[in-house]
Image: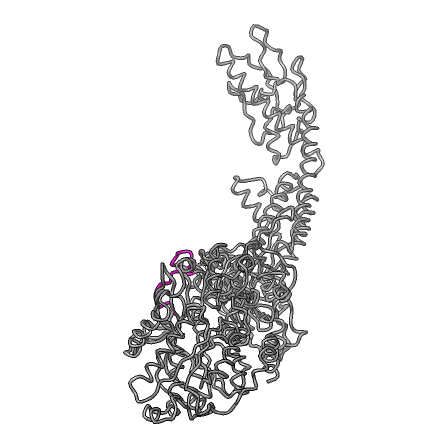
Amino acid sequence: MARKKVASCCFKLLLLPSLIAWSTVLSLDSSPWKQSEELSVGGIVDLTTHIGKEERAAMQVAIEDFFSGVDLNSPTLLVKDSRGDPTRAVSSAKNLIKKNHVAAIVGLRTWPETFFVAEVGNKSKVPIISLSNEVPSWNDSNRPFLVNAARGQFAQMKAVADIISSWKWRKVNVIYEDINSAVSGIIPYLISALQDAGLEISQLLPLTPTLSDHSLSKSLTDLKNGQCRVQIVHASAPLAAKIFRNAKRIGMMEKEFVWITTVDTMNLIDTLDTSTISSMQGVLGVKSYYSRSTKQFKNFRFRFNSKFRELYPQEPYHEPCVYSLQAYDAMRAVSLALKDGVPSSKSFRNSTNNSLMLSISGEKIVSRISESNFEGLAGAFNFQKGILSHERIFRIINVVGKSYREIGYWTEKLGFSESTHAGSKYTKSMRLLGQVFWPGGPWSVPRGWALPTSAEPLKIGVPVSNSHKEFVEVVYDQLGRGVVVKGFSINVFDATLKFLPYYLPHIFVPFNGTYDSLVEQVKLQNYDAVVADTAIVAKRFQCGDFSQPYADSGLQMLIIVRTKNINRAWLFTKPFSTSMWISIGAINIYNGFVVWLIERNDERNRDAEIRRGSLLKQIGYMLYSAFKTLFSLNVDNLSSNLSRIVVVVWLFLALVLTQSFTASLSSMFFDQGNHPATVDVETLRNTGAKIGCDGGSFVVAYLRDVLNIHPDNIVKIYSGDAYAKALVSGEIAAAYLEVPYLKVFLAKNCEGFTTSGPIYKVGGFGFVFQRSSPYLPDISEAIVKVVESGTLKDLENSLTSSYKCVAADSSDEHHRLDVSSFQGLFGISVGISSFALLLFYIFYRREQIARDPEEAAGPGPPAHEPPARGSEPPARGPAAHEPPAGGPEPPARGPEPPAHEPPAREPEPPTRGPEPPARGTEPPAHEPPAIELVARGPAAHEQPALEPEPPAQGPAADDNIHRNRKRSSSRSTRTSSISHRKSSHSY
């Protein structure tokens, strides 16, 4: 109430000079009309406008229609021209009341005129019938003689809001005529209707009727440079025409712009000139509805046409607008109220004067008008609580070409329809009414917004410290200048942008912090959006709005699997990994080879098997000796100190391996027989088990506050790959992960892990935008299209299929040993063996070098070497090939001594013969038969023949000599080699 009084007082101060100028005429006679007064009705209209002229003609037709053909005297209609000036309206009202003694005043299209004239009528107790459409809310009952006979058009604002909602636009600009009634009258209804429809007003632009074209163009340019492209125009027809002319000139009637007008403009569209219509192409608007098919309207139109041409022959003819219909209905209500107060023609003829007298008071006229109930030309004429029923049906028109076309209707509480007949189909969206011709010519629906002229790309924040790199990963180049952002969430966002009907420029900005801090940056307007695996949580809605979820929602437990049905036949192979078994075999063979090589070349080794047999037999002997070391200590059978060192180190390693194998296998058998019961959150909470979760996510608070897990039992994990190790090692008994993370984890670890317990519903993953962002509805719709098209399913499959499933038996892998556990011992063993092999090689080469000069000198020439051809035969002497005295005669090609030849007699020294053999090659006279190899050489102990036979003559003799020479050389070499081995030291 206080606000109403303040607004009323402010409005009075605006026209204080007018009130002072006319204050002297307010003391009028408040009594009823005198008996000598002639009955008349006043009218105050703006005859400078087409509306005022139509109202005058319509009121005249109403009086004539009502009083003609009945036994009543017709009152006189006195019309005054206010020219839209409240001061002139007040002056005209006082003249009509004081001089003409009118019974009522009808007209007053604007609220300022109505306000001041109502003050005059209140003082003089003359009813004021206003045709103003916009009566402010602070108008109260202090004006009992004011009756508003114009229909309330507040419902049109709901129609405008429904039109905008039909095309999914979210923001609008409101351009309105800056008059007091607009601000305090119908504009609040428009704002309320837009808010109820979930729409946001981007800018409010008030314009005065006297605004210059330059100032108007500048104001419109500011709107053009903004983001919103939907404009609502609520202004009178003259101002609206000026707005559209300037809008076309600056390029605001082109593609992607939307213009919607109210009834103040569209009700007079028939009166606009062709140039204005051409600048309004594509404009959508609402227009008052009235039936044009009734007999009453057709009769009125015929009489109105005649009267209008009679009064204004120079004016172009138009169909009667709704304002003329309202004036007709108002005058009809006044005529009905005056009916009982107007004397009949018989009474008039019997009267003493020629005056038409009235015997009804102003209060009675107001009361009767308020009680009116008839079907007027503009609709039902009845009052509810002193207010005429408002319009409930509006036409939806679209300006095309030289005129406009009606595309449908809007009915309050029903919606849009193609007709108003009974049984019509109604819908909440006007899309079903058919195509709309939009500004710029295209039939495609404008998106209703655009990037500002000087707009920069969207700044989209992405997290750097992300536990699950499969979803978002920020990669810097080597110089740290460029940033590459990849992952599942980024792929979904890129796919979403492809379904937008426009290009959306954007840049990714890395943010190093928690997800809550990142979302808060949107609230601080540091980022326009956040694209990541951001969980939709209630508290984050305080910082921004979320898009449609693009990933499954839910939180579930992850546990390790203890497999019961395992193949125990091969369980003995589990303690060591495959690489471990291969390493053991390789090192064993290598050490065995080193020992075999050293022992085979050591003369002190009396094992005959180490030197005899084929290559395959030697390899088998080597492998047997090598693996026998794992199970027995056979150092005593070794003759070389080098091989003993190798075996001792290898035996120590074998002991460690054996003990480790036994312990690991025992643990596996124990685990196979102990399977825990089903894991649930109650068990974990009661036993105080450790539970893992993502350290930087909302799951920490969820476990603490919702599942009542003690904070000390919550283990924060900052890497998705760390969960498997933590579960296998027993660091945590279970882990809680969001469902998308679980899918990836189980894809990477197909065996050994599983989910347990119920899925706790959470919001899922979504993109974050600033509140009321115009992009958000389109992004959400595009995400739905990504899902419906199957693109999201393909992205999910590529996310999980890119990982090769790692089969991990969690009950065994924890106890399994690999090479890394024994690489130190393996290194020592291989090193010692290699060092022993090196020493053996050095000793062997030194021995070879020492033996080479002796072999090069060799024994003297053999006794049986024949002389050169033509020389004399050698002298008699004890030759190596001669048989002993008294023995059988040797064969022609040299005798072969028997295996056990009896010792011969001491030979006589030869008078002439070859040089004695080299030292060390002659065995003792009684050599034991075991040294058989030495006895086969040309021994000096054999008895020489008493008479050596002369050498044979001819080629055959030469061949025999050559063969005997080769045999003597070979035997001498073998004897020397064996003698050297016996005399050398062992390795």
Residue 274, placed above or below residue 339: above
Q: Position of residue 825 (x, y in %)?
A: 67, 52
228 and 278: which is toward the camera? 278
User: Which range is magenta?
Assistant: 430-445
Q: Position of residue 585 (x, y in %)?
A: 57, 50
Give the position of the N terminus as an image quadrant. Answer: bottom right
Residue 350, placed above or below residue 434: below
How are the colours assigned in the image?
one colour
Q: Position of residue 969 (x, y in %)?
A: 59, 22
Q: Is residue 759 visible?
A: no
224 and 787: which is toward the camera? 224
Query: How many badges with numbers are in the image?
Result: 0
63 and 323: which is toward the camera? 63
Instruction: Find the residue positioned furthest to the top.
Output: 870
Q: In the picture provided, is 668 more to the left or to the right than 395?
A: right
Using the rendered view, name the quadrant where residue 667 is placed.
Answer: bottom right
Q: In the picture provided, is 875 more to the left or to the right than 283?
A: right
Instruction: Find the residue positioned furthest to the right.
Output: 985
Q: In the picture provided, is 67 more to the left or to the right than 161?
A: left
Q: Magenta residues: mostly which secondary structure?
A: loop
At x 54%, y 46%, the residue is 620
Instruction: Find the residue positioned furthest to the left.
Output: 295
In magenta segment, residue 434: yes
Residue 616, placed above or below residue 16: above
408 and 687: which is toward the camera? 408
Q: Position of residue 520 (x, y in %)?
A: 63, 66
Give the position of the C terminus as an image quadrant. Answer: top right
Q: Is residue 387 visible?
A: yes
Using the rendered view, name the quadrant where residue 210 is placed.
Answer: bottom right
In magenta segment, residue 612: no
